[in-house]
C-alpha cells in the first residue's frame, strides 16, 4: 500500500459521515485478545449501564525496575471516531509490545457516543473538553482511576479528525525530551497521507506535527491530554487519523504511529 493510492473521499464535510462500528463487539474482541495475552481488566465505575475499563499489562520480566517504562494509551473519547478502538483491537491482537513496557490501555472512553455515532456522550457533552471540571460521569470515573495510577513515561491519545487532509500529531513535551513525533510521522507516511498544511486546527504545524505552547491553567476547558500533562506525564501525543479516508487506512495509520512511538521509548542500558 502506498499513500498515493489514497485520496480524500469527499464524504465528510461539516461532520463525520463515514463508517460506523459495532462497538460492543469490538470491545469483546479486545477483551478476548487482552485476556489471551496476559492483561488484566480494571473497571472504572461510572454509572449504571455505562461501563468503562482499562487493560493493564506489567512489563515482561526479567527487567530491572529502572528500565521499565510506563505507557498509557486511550481512545474512543469521541463516538464518531471509530479508528481508535479498532486500532486498540489490532494492537492487542498483534501483541507486539516492547518487553520493558508496563502498559495501560483504555479502549473506549465514550461508549454512549459510539452507540449514537456522535462526538459527545449521551448528553452531547464533548468529554475531551471536560477534564478540568469533570461534569460527566465518564470523566469523573476516568480521573478517579487515573489518580490511582503511577506517573507515565509516555501517553498516547488516539483520535480522528474529519477535517484533516492526512494524519497529524500533537506533541506536549514541556521539558524538551527527545521527541517521538518525527518517527511516528515517518512510520505513518508509509500507510496513510500526512497532513502537510502549515496551519492545522488553527495552530502552526510542520510536517504533520503540531507543538503547541499551552498553559493549561489559563484554559477553561481541558482535553484529556491537558489533564495528563498536568498530573500524570511529561510527554503526551494526540494522534489524529484523517476520517475522510477509508477506515482501514486510518486504522493502519494509528497502529503504525503507536508502534513507532513504542519502539522509540528507550529503557535504560539494562532494558
Ligand atoms: Zn477526537
Image (cartoon, grey):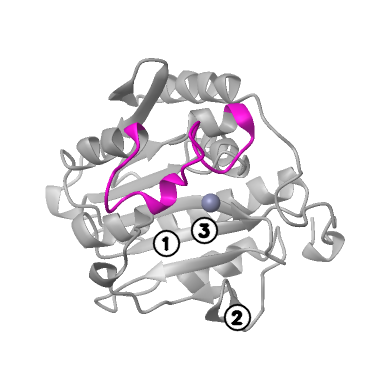
Q: In which quadrant is the C terminus drawn?
A: bottom left
Dot 3 corresponds to which residue? Answer: 239
**Residue visible at 41% across and 44% down in the picture:** 74
Mark 3 or mark 2, whichever is nearer to me: 2
Lateral position of residue 122 relative to residue 265, left or right? right
Q: Residues within 10 Å of mark 2 (few under 14, many from 20)?
A: few
The numbered mark at residue 237 is 1
Find the magenta span and give its range: 115-137
Earlier in the chain: of badge 3 and badge 2, it is: 2
Q: Give the main secondary structure, helix, strand or loop, of the magenta stretch.
A: loop
Lateral position of residue 45 relative to residue 191, left or right? left
Q: Are marks 3 and 1 in contact (CB under 8 Å)?
A: yes
Instruction: Give the percent coordinates (x, y) of residue 206.
Output: 56, 82
Residue most extreme to the front? 123
- Identify the element where label 3 is drawn: strand
Camera sees residue 105: yes
**Residue visible at 15% across and 38% down in the picture:** 148
Q: Is residue 122 magenta?
A: yes
Task: Please tell me in which quadrant of the rendered image residue 153 appears.
Answer: bottom left
Q: Is residue 9 magenta?
A: no
Query: How far separated are the C-alphas under marks 3 and 2?
Result: 16 Å
Choose between 173 and 33: the one closer to the eye: 173
The numbered mark at residue 199 is 2
Q: Residues within 10 Å of mark 3 (few under 14, many from 20)?
A: many
- Identify the element where label 1 is drawn: strand
Instruction: Give the percent coordinates (x, y) of residue 119.
Output: 57, 43
**Residue visible at 42% across and 45% down in the picture:** 127
Amino acid at each position: 500500500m502506498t499513500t498515493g493510492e489514497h485520496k480524500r473521499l469527499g464524504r465528510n464535510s461539516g461532520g463525520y459521515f463515514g463508517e460506523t462500528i459495532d462497538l460492543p463487539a469490538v470491545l469483546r474482541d479486545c477483551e478476548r485478545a487482552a485476556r489471551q495475552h496476559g492483561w488484566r481488566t480494571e473497571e472504572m465505575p461510572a454509572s449504571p449501564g455505562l461501563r468503562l475499563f482499562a487493560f493493564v499489562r506489567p512489563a515482561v520480566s526479567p527487567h530491572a525496575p529502572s528500565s521499565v517504562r510506563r505507557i498509557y494509551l486511550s481512545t474512543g473519547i469521541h463516538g464518531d471516531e471509530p479508528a481508535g478502538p479498532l486500532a486498540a483491537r489490532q494492537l492487542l491482537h498483534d501483541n507486539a509490545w516492547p518487553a520493558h513496557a508496563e502498559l495501560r490501555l483504555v479502549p473506549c472512553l465514550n461508549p454512549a457516543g459510539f452507540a449514537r455515532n456522535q462526538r459527545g456522550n449521551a448528553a452531547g457533552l464533548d468529554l475531551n473538553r471536560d477534564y478540568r471540571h469533570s461534569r460527566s460521569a465518564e470523566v469523573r470515573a476516568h480521573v478517579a482511576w487515573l489518580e490511582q495510577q503511577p506517573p507515565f513515561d509516555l501517553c498516547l491519545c488516539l483520535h480522528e479528525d474529519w477535517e484533516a487532509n492526512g494524519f497529524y500529531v500533537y506533541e506536549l513535551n514541556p521539558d524538551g525530551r527527545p521527541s517521538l513525533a518525527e518517527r511516528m510521522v515517518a512510520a505513518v507516511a508509509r500507510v496513510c497521507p500526512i497532513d502537510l498544511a502549515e496551519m492545522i486546527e488553527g495552530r502552526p504545524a510542520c510536517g504533520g506535527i503540531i507543538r503547541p505552547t499551552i498553559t493549561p491553567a489559563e484554559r477553561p476547558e481541558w482535553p484529556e491530554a491537558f489533564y495528563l500533562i498536568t498530573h500524570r506525564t511529561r510527554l503526551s501525543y494526540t494522534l489524529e487519523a484523517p476520517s475522510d479516508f477509508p477506515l482501514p487506512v486510518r486504522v493502519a495509520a494509528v497502529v503504525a504511529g503507536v508502534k513507532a512511538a513504542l519502539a522509540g521509548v528507550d529503557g535504560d542500558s539494562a532494558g
